[in-house]
Image: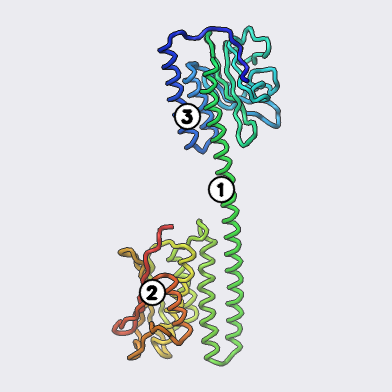
Amino acid sequence: MPVVEENGAGSDDPADAIRYRLDQQRILARFGGVALRSRDIDEIVRAAVELAANGMRTRLAKFLHHDTARGGLIVRAGVGWNEGVVGGAEIGDDLGSPAGFAFQTGEPVISNHLRDEKRFRTPDFMADHGVKRAINVLVEANGKRFGVLEVDSRQDGRFEEDDLAFMQGFANLIGVAIERLEAENNLRAAIEHQELLTREASHRVKNSLAMVSAMLNLQMREDDDPRVQRMLGDAQARIVAIGQAHDQLWQGERVGIVALERLLCGIVDQLREQAPDHAIECDIAPLVVSGDTAIPLGLLLTELVTNAVKYAYGEGGGPVRIETRCADGALTMTVADQGIGLPEGLDPTASRPTSLGMRMVTSLTRQLGGTLAFEKAGPGTRAVFSMPLPEKV
């Protein structure tokens, strides 16, 4: 039950009393918006004391935050107080003051005539401000006592039990806001930890793939069989493509998001080293994609460029150009050469391709939900891949 000291007199005008309660409802609703939107607890308690004072038709209010280490109630926010009170004044958290009693027992306290109060002492700074009456309510969050919201007045009058509903509404909203902020902070910390783990995992995968690529390179140097060297080179190119994607996944500001230009041009740089006789150029439209899109797209590029390098110019070299465009809701990637062109009657997109490379191209195209066509470029061949433009990430 609330502790109420009944000295003093309130307004006897029924119309004024109705306006008073309606104003309180409006003010409480306004504070609810602040408590639900703000991410700053200091902003929330500042708004609480200002609006609570307005709603109680007084110029003095404060929020007392409990200092666990010192065992006291510190004035964290307030209106109407002299300089130095907010952030400096302190009230004991024992049962001897109205605020301390509310904090210790959880029961709201109304004291309408502090000068004649026998049960509680009046803190010196409140007496210096001529405070005659006060109302205190506990603020709790997540089952823990956080502090006390108090409204004070220099005027004679009476805080009534109906005022407690108004004050308790403020206290409840502050508590909910604190719980929300704590939940958001916990969620943010969990997300940051998950991002750290994801970055670490991608970094480890990238390093492991680099080690495998180096081993394949050593194996190619030791084997004189051109067919084996070609197969190992193809495998190395695929591993490098996956490694590039993982490198981008953990290095970017947003985990799991890749800038397509950096990824594809990075893969092209690696392919240039493996095919120094070919002038491989890339023109990539700005786009960010998820890792689920980046990895198969990087592999598809690797296969198409590798095919152009291997078959377009025979024993010699020549230009290979990669271009992507984003238009009409589609992402289009083109790999073009100026070589000998496709043999007559050859359909690389046949339903059952025989080479491993073309089987991978077909599988990756299907995985990305796209289409692939090979066109005569006059001279040379142009491979055109198209897929729905990925949703913004």
Q: Nearer the viewer, residue 298 or 213?
A: 298
Is residue 104 left or right of 262 when viewed as pictured? right
How many numbered discs, if any? Answer: 3
Q: Nearer the viewer, residue 364 or 208?
A: 364
- According to the picture, the residue beneath numbered tag 3 turns out to be 31
The N terminus lies in quadrant: top right
In the image, residue 179 lies at what x, y percent? 57, 38
Which residue type carries mark 2?
Ile
The C terminus lies in quadrant: bottom left
Q: Residue at x 36, y 89 (%)?
A: 346
In the image, residue 31 lies at what x, y percent? 47, 29
Q: Nearer the viewer, residue 305 or 276?
A: 305
- According to the picture, the residue beneath numbered tag 2 turns out to be 322
- According to the picture, the residue beneath numbered tag 1 turns out to be 188
- Whether 265 is drawn above or below 20: the answer is below
Is residue 336 left or right of 210 when viewed as pictured? left
- Residue 137, by quadrant, is top right
- Whether 137 is drawn above or below 303: the answer is above
Say which element carries label 1. helix
Which residue type carries mark 1?
Arg
- Residue 319, by quadrant, is bottom left
Is residue 131 visible in the rendered image? The answer is: no
Q: For the residues marked 1 and 2, what is the alpha-carbon distance in whole angstroms?
A: 40 Å
- Residue lying farthest to the bottom in this orientation: 225
Within 10 Å of disc 2 (Cα), the crowding (few <14, some 14-19, many 20+) is many
Contact check, label 1 and label 2, Cβ < 8 Å = no
Contact check, label 3 and label 1, Cβ < 8 Å = no
In the image, residue 357 lies at what x, y percent? 46, 82
